Amino acid sequence: MPNQSLVTVILAGGKGERFWPLSRRNRPKQFLSLDGSGRSLLQATAERLLAIAGGWASIYVVTASHLADGVREQLPELPEENLLIEPEGRDTAPAVTWSTLRIAERYGKDTVVGFFPADHWIADEAAFQSTLQAAAELATKEDAIVTLGIAPTFASTGYGYIQAGEAIGTYGTNAEQEGFPAYRVTRFTEKPDRDTAEQFLATGTFSWNSGMFVFRAGVALDELLVYAPEIMGPLEEQGVEAYPTLPKKSIDYALMEKTQQAYVLPVAFGWDDLGDWNAIERLLKGESANVELARHIGLDTHGALFYATDQDDLIVTIGLEDTVIVRDGNVTLIVKKDRTQEIKQVLKEIQADPQFKDLL
C-alpha cells in the first residue's frame, strides 16, 4: 500500500450539460479549461491532490467508459489499474460504493479514502490540503463519514445542506496551525426548496455539501450495507457486472441523509462547484462591464459573458444585459444569465431530433 494516509478518488463521470455547447458527450466539463489557465478541471483536481496523496499511485479516477480515453489523455501519469471504468453512469452512489470496494480489496478496510468531484474550483490549495489532513485524522480516529462543509452565501436550492450539531473536537492541529473544529451532523438535506433553504440560512448552523467525503473504507461499506443494500449487495457479489441492475442514485440520497456516522468539517478555502456559465463570471468578474473569453465589440452591453473556442471569431453586441453568449464550432448559445439552468431542457429537445444528434 502507498505509504501516505489518504487514498484519493476523483469522480469524473459527469456530463456538465449546463456548460453546453462547450461541454459535449465526449468532451464534458471536467475536460475543459474554463478559467483561462490552460489546465482542465480534471487536471487541476489531480494536481491539487498529488501533494497529499503522495504520488500518482494513490490517485484513482472513476469515469464512464466513453470518457476513459479522454482521462488517459489528460492524465498520462495515472496508473492504468487506478482508472476505474463504469460501463454506464448510475450516479455517485454506485461510483463511490464500487470504488471503495476496490480500494478495500487492494489495501484493506482500514484505508482512509477521500472522494472529490473532478469539476470544482478551489481558491487556496494549501488550506485545501490542510483541511484534508484534518479530515483524514478524524476518519482515522472515529467511525466517521466526514463531509467538507462550505459556508453558504445565499439560499441555494441546488446544493445539499448539512446542519452542524455537537462539536467533537479539533483536528489537524500541529505546530503550524490551530486545527479545524469538527461536528456531528444532525441533519443532511439534499436540495431543499427555496423557503426551506432560506430557513436553513437564517439559523447559521448549516453548511453547503461540497460533495467531498473522507472515511475509512470499512466504515462506509458497513453503512452502505445497511442503508443502500440494493447497491452494495450486487456490487459486492458481482462487481462492475452488476451495474445494469443498479438504481440511479446519488450518494447523498443513498447514504448521507440516512447514516448516523456523518460528521462535518467546515472548510477554510474558497470553493465553487462551477455548476453553470454564471460560475465563470463569479471567478473572473473584475471591474469591467463584462467577462470576455472571446473577441468582443459591444455597444451598451453590460453584465454579459462571452466565450468562443475559436479566437478568430468576433462577437458583436448592441444593447444587451445579463446575457451569456457561447460560440463553439457550428453552435451558438445565447441565454439570459438567470435561465442557464434551462439548458438541460433544450438538450432534451435536441436529443429528440435526429438532425441535431451530432451537436450533443
Image: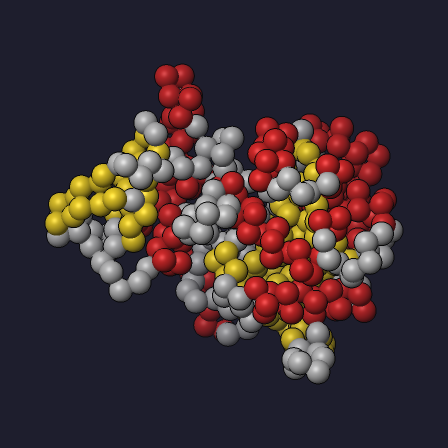
Quarter holding residue 315: top left
Name the residue nearer the viewer: 341 or 121.
121
Image point 70% across, 67% down: which residue? 133
- Residue that lies at the very extreme toward the top in this rendered image: 354
The location of residue 172, given as percent across then percent down, is 70, 74
The quadrant of the rendering that contains the C terminus is top left
Examine the rendered structure and indicate whether residue 330 appears above or below residue 191. Answer: above
Name the residue nearer the viewer: 30 or 295.
295
Chosen colour scheme = secondary structure
Name the residue nearer the viewer: 45 or 164.
45
Give the side of residue 203 with respect to residue 173, left or right. left
Image point 16% across, 48% down: which residue? 298
Residue 228 shows in this picture = no
Image point 67% across, 33% down: which residue? 86
Image point 48% across, 58% down: which residue? 272
Give the side of residue 245 with respect to residue 156, left or right. right
The location of residue 299, given as percent across then percent down, is 12, 49
Residue 8 shows in this picture = yes
Quarter holding residue 294: top left
Badge count: 0
The location of residue 316, given as percent across then percent down, is 18, 41
The location of residue 38, given as percent across then percent down, is 46, 47
Examine the rendered structure and indicate whether residue 257 appears above or below residue 232. Answer: below
